[in-house]
Image: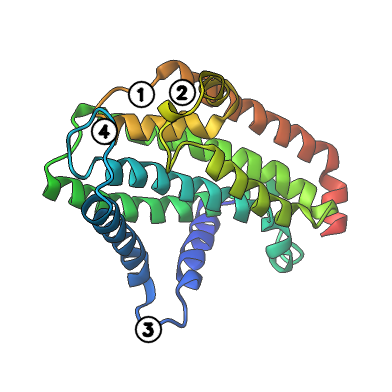
Amino acid sequence: MTLSLLLAFTRQDFVDRYSGSAFGALWAFIHPLVMIFIFTVIFANVMGARLPGVSSVYSYSIYLVAGLLPWLAFANTLTRSASVFLDKRHIISKVHIGLPYLPIYIVLSETLTFLISLAIFMVFLLLSGTVPGKTLLLVPFIFLSQQILAFALGLLLGILNVFLRDIKEMVTVLLTFWFWLTPIVWVPSIAPQWVQYLQDYFNPAYQFIHAYQAIFAYGQLPDFAGLTRLVILAHVVLLGAWLLFKALEKDIRDFI
């Protein structure tokens, strides 16, 4: 797949998402703006929610948004990649496309959405006087690591979805459980020690979510050991998905 074709897919995907609406691409700014406003007003001012160990009135709102934005990028990339081969079969049947590279346009599209949301979040942090320091420089690395994992899992599930169409629905259900099992709306310290241990070693989403929350909510460096495990896992899954595709490539094209 050429770079120009990949960028064309990305652009078309972003345009199609808001086609037919009166505000068009403005919804990409409106959605995160409304979300951040609601979390700030409801949790900080109405419910008076506070983050343990942090004095800022907006601490819990920042903690919540810092975890929710990357989760949405990760979950959307994974969900959409899991059905990409079937969704694009009308193109695949007409144009010779390197199938393992096809989900990359979804990664790029969700990255653009994340960057817009992050920019609005940064404006809020600037206005509230809670902008992190140099630790912000680690955000691109964390995001790249999580999206490699999302791409790898999406590719793996996308291959399986060609043969078992229930995979897409299963992914939606599993991601719902995964969301609530990951400390995005709750704080790890409220859970028993064994739950924290399981999070640290068996929940890859915890590694990148916790890293964002450490940077934005606590102003601390993330756990580099956990991020290392995340990077290793992402590349292992990616290698596994690639090998599976190579073994089933002919069957995949026939089934599509």
Residue 134, quarter of picture: top left
> Which residue has dot 3 on it?
22
Disc with the residue nearer the chain's start (1 vs 3): 3
Disc with the residue nearer the chain's start (2 vs 1): 1
Q: Amino acid at mark 4?
A: Leu
* Colour scheme in use: rainbow
> Which residue has dot 1 on it?
222
Disc with the residue nearer the chain's start (4 vs 3): 3
Query: Does residue 55 lie above or below 13 as drawn?
Result: above
Left or right: 98 in relation to 32: right
* Label 4: element kind: helix
Cα separation, mark 1 vs mark 3, equals 41 Å
Q: Quadrant of the C terminus?
A: bottom right
Left or right: 169 in relation to 192: right
Whether residue 98 is visible here, answered yes or no, is: no
The residue located at (51%, 49%) in the rendering is: 107
> Which residue has dot 2 on it?
227
